[in-house]
Amino acid sequence: MCMACVVDEQTKERIIAYRAEFYRVTKSPFGSDDEIGMLSVIDAQSRAAILSRADPSKVFDLSVDHFVGMPGWFGAGDQPYQIWMTHTPAGEIVANTMGVSLEANALVAYSGDAISMYTHCGTHIDTFNHFGYNGRIFNEFSAAEHLGSRAWDKCGAEKHPPIFARGILLDVAALHGVDTLPPSHPIGPADLQGCLKRQGLEVRLGDVVLIRTGQMRLWPDIAFVSNTPGLNRAGAEFLAKSGAIMIGADNLTLEQTPASEPLNFFPVHTYLLAEAGVPILEMAWLEELAAEGVDEFAFFGACIKLRGATGAPMRPVAMPLN
C-alpha cells in the first residue's frame, strides 16, 4: 500500500506548512509569542504514548563525536571545531594557577580544557533564527527588533524543549540500492513516497523524520562536505505537510547542494525554518539504525541551551518500539 500521508482538515489546522506562502515568513497558529513552531505539538499525552512503547533494551546513539579536523560547514568562513588544554598536571606544577603547594599540585593532577566552534558543528539542531526572509524570521520576528549585538532574543536554542516523539527512518540510499546516494541527488516526493511504500510506513502528525542518504559512509573524509545529496523543496513540503515536527538527515546540510534555485542558496532551510515552522537536525548518525532495520522508533533529543543561538549541539538517541 502506498502511504501518501493523507491529512484530514482538522489535522491541517495544526500543521504550519499549510499556512506557508512562498518566500514569506509564516505567522504561527500557536500564538504571537511562539518560538518553537511544530515542536508545540509535543505534549504530555504524546510523550507518554511514545515512552510507553520504547524498548530500553537497545539504545542507538544518533550523534557523531567532535574532534579537531572534523568535517563541517565552514564554506562561509566559520570557526572549525578546536579544543585545547587550559590546565595540565605538569603545567600546574609550573604555573601553579591555584596558588597551592607543589605537593598539592602533584597530588591532584588537574586537567581542564576549552572548546571553540561554530554552533552548527557535528550533530546539531537549526533554530528558527538561523534563516528567514528579508530581515524577518518565523512568526514575523524581525532583526530590527529582536537581534542585539550578540544574539537574537527570539527563537534561540534555549527555547527548544526536550523532544520525545515517534521517529521514522526513510532510507533513500537503500531504496536506490546504493551505499550512498550520488552527489547532489535531489530527494523529492517520489523518493520519500518510495521509501514509505517499501518500508510500510506513514508520516504522522508529531513525527521526527530522519532521512538516510548514506553520506555517513564517507565520514569523516572531506568528501562528506561536497555536493551533498539531500532534500529539495518539494520533498521538504511533502514531509512538512504530512505532519513532521522535525526533519533531519545524515548529511552536512539536510538539503541538496548546490541549490537548484539561482537566488536562494538554501531553499529547504528557508522553507522549513521560516515558512513551515519545522526545525532541522543535521549530521545524524543513522548507520546502526539502518543496519539493524529499525525504521520506527522512540526518538529522544535535547540540545544545549545556548541562549539566542542559531543552532546547538544535540545528542539524540533512538529506542526500538515494543
Image (cartoon, rainbow, N blue to C red):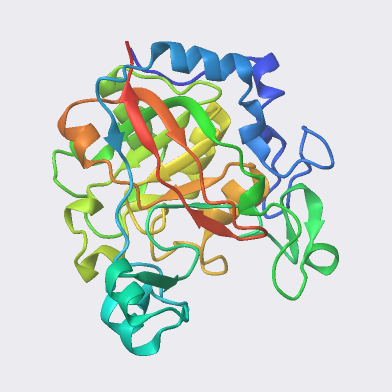
Quarter holding the N terminus is top left
Q: Is residue 238 left or right of residue 177?
A: right
Spot occupied by residue 204 in the image (x, y as percentages of width and height): 50, 20
Spot occupied by residue 98 in the image (x, y as percentages of width and height): 47, 78
Q: Is residue 247 visible?
A: yes
**In the figure, residue 221 lies in which quadrant?**
bottom left
* Residue positioned 23% across, 52% down in the render: 216
**In the figure, residue 75 lies in which quadrant?**
bottom left
Q: Nearer the viewer, residue 20 or 314?
A: 314
User: From what the image shows, is residue 219 above or below residue 71?
Assistant: above
User: From what the image shows, is residue 184 above or below residue 31?
Assistant: below
Spot occupied by residue 23 in the image (x, y as percentages of width and height): 68, 55
User: From what the image shows, is residue 95 above or below residue 112?
Assistant: below
* Residue positioned 21% across, 63% down in the render: 220
Q: How many marks?
A: 0
Q: Nearer the viewer, residue 265 or 121?
A: 121
Spot occupied by residue 277 in the image (x, y as percentages of width and height): 64, 42
Q: Is residue 175 visible?
A: no
